[in-house]
Image (cartoon, coloured by chain):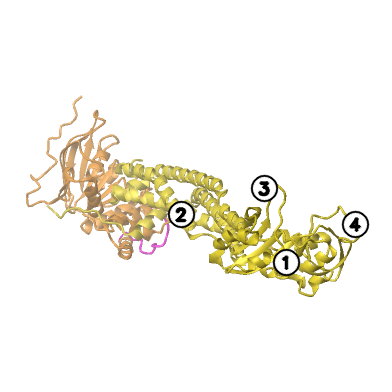
Chain colours: A yellow, B orange
Amino acid sequence: MTRRLVPARLGPADVLRVGAAGLRTRPTRVFLSALGIAIGIATMIAVIGISSSSREQLLRQLDRLGTNMLTVSAGHTLFGDTSQLPTGAVAMVKRIGPVSTAAATGTVDATVRRTNLIPKAVTGGIAVQAATTDLLTALEGSVTKGTWLNAATERQPAVVLGSVAAKRLGVDRTGVRVWIGNRWFTVIGVLGPMPLAPEIERSALVGFPVAAERLGFDGHPTTIYERSAEESVEAVRSVLPRTVNPENPEEVEVSRPSDALAARAAAAGAFTNLLLGLGGVALLVGGVGVANTMVISVLERRKEIGLRRSLGATRGQVRIQFLTESLLLSALGGVAGSVLGALATVGYALSQGWPPVVPPWAIAGAVGATLVVGTVAGLYPAMRAARLSPTVALAT
Amino acid sequence: MSGRIDERPALRDGSPDTPDGPYVVELRDVTKMYGGRVQALRGVNLAIGAGELVAIVGPSGSGKSTMLHMIGTLDRPSGGTVRIAGHDVAGLSDRELSALRARHLGFVFQKFHLSPGTSALDNVADGLLYAGVPLRVRRERAAAALERVGLGHRLGHRPEQMSGGEQQRVAVARAVAGDPPLLLADEPTGNLDSAAGAEVLRVLRDLHAAGTTIAVITHDMEIAEWCPRRVRVRDGRIVNDEGSGHRPPAEITIGARE
């Protein structure tokens, strides 16, 4: 007897060559069935990418603004009346060890108008507030025009406008006068945006002394802004009420403005689950398309399968050929989809002014999903191809 | 009506163990049933020695295609023994049969079965894919095989750029690129005009002269007469087996103009 018969193994390069041969001759069909997969993958990548970009934007903003600021504001008394913070509250807060800066604003019972000819009721939603001179430091804010209040100007009829307030009053330069209470104040500065303190954006800020002297301000702060070392924020938070108002600590409200931004960042991914599911459905439909293409391909290529069997291909080699073809088909869709999804993410993020972020795990997930889809879609057609009798090549 | 009884045993010169062997093809009492009712082969005995050129000839429905399936190990017999290149087909798994086809058999089909859009060289090279030959060697041998069939100048041509005769010669080159002990040609001239058919027969003649064992399955009496040994099949039996397969074939008269 001659030597044992053992079929030759195909190397990976030959497996790829054979698998790709079937695709090369049918470009239109390959394009259309890969398109289904591409749409699914692109949707998923874009959904993940856009929500990641939006979260990244919020996180960067948080990073820039810092999460070490707490605000203290007057709450309500036991009977529901609005309470007041003691006049010495700011000084007390500054005495807490880890606190680096503390500043206060106090609501002034006055309105700001462009001129005295505008009726009193037309306030434009702008509050007039007294501010301590270190408020800008505490908020880490900046002036876009002019200057902030200083020890001299806080005693003068000078006002610094929040960014929104300036826009609503139609003030775009310093030196103009606005009507506050019953007299003219000169605008000496306009503030930039304050994401952590949007109420400041809508305020006209004057010094504590001038407010007390000319606008009947009682000297009680309404809100205290303080910053401390990052690691002791919680400790500071727990002692703040007693420090600010030892007699009635329960009438003091402490909040952390950055929590709102952090919550938004956390929520940025939540609504995407539905869209992700939609992408999943598209991917599934794409997979069915690939399976369909493969079944038709096997039916059409009975002759080729028979020929390969007569050339000595084993059932396993025929199975691998069609499985490879299916995998290549969906991998093609997966790659195209990933590129499209990434482009959509970059395009949308740039249009929103966000940093474009496509997480590597999303790409890895897309590749994994494509391989799974390609395998599942190709399994049945490949088995059918392998089961064909070698005699089909001879049938005429 | 009684069919002709095959008086002369087709398996000539005794058992394959005689010094005349080894045979490339041995069929002993081979029967084949389809669906348990249709009897395609009714006890066929045939031996083909190395280097023979044999025509298996018969009208459609005679069982010659089934014989091709048996000899080509594309199907298994219902009864009897099929030995190809010394291997008993009954004892081989599907994987082993595939390996047998890859190393010992070359097929030429009536409809060529070339891959469109692929060069003649790669079409021939792919014939060696399942024999475990590296790509570079496949291409070298393919070029040599194409040279043998007289197409050394057309390596880069695609099937659709070639005539029918040339395409069939590419198919012959694919079948013989691995130097198989047996070349099976199923109606090799069936789709060709007589001039192109003569081209292909000339290639077969040259291969035979170089020592390749060739079995041509055909219903065409002219082709059959051309072969030095003729095995006539009818109703699933061998009714006549004449001539010596070792002699050179007749002059090619068909399409002799050229």
The residue lying furthest to the right in this view is: A117
For the record, the magenta segment spans: B148-158
Gap in Å between the C-alphas at discs 3 and 1?
38 Å
Q: Earlier in the sequence, mark 2 or mark 1?
A: 1
Mark 4 and mark 1 in contact? Answer it, CB < 8 Å.
Answer: no
Q: Nearer the viewer, residue A135 or B194?
A: A135
Disc 4 and disc 3 on one polypeptide chain:
yes
Gap in Å between the C-alphas at discs 2 and 1?
42 Å
Q: Earlier in the sequence, mark 3 or mark 2?
A: 3
Instruction: Please name the residue that numbered disc 3 is placed on.
Output: A78
Q: Earlier in the sequence, mark 4 or mark 3?
A: 3
Specify few, some or many for label 4: CA neighbours under 10 Å numbering under 14, 14-19, or 20 or more: few
Gap in Å between the C-alphas at discs 4 and 1?
26 Å
Provide the major secondary structure of the magenta segment: loop
Gap in Å between the C-alphas at discs 4 and 3?
39 Å
Q: Is residue B46 above or below residue A359?
A: above
Q: Position of residue A338 (x, y in %)?
A: 51, 56
User: Can residue A125 be seen from the camera position used here?
Assistant: yes
Mark 3 and mark 1 in contact? Answer it, CB < 8 Å.
Answer: no
User: What secondary structure is marked by label 4?
Assistant: loop
Instruction: Please name the residue that numbered disc 4 is placed on.
Output: A118
User: Can residue A24 be seen from the camera position used here?
Assistant: no
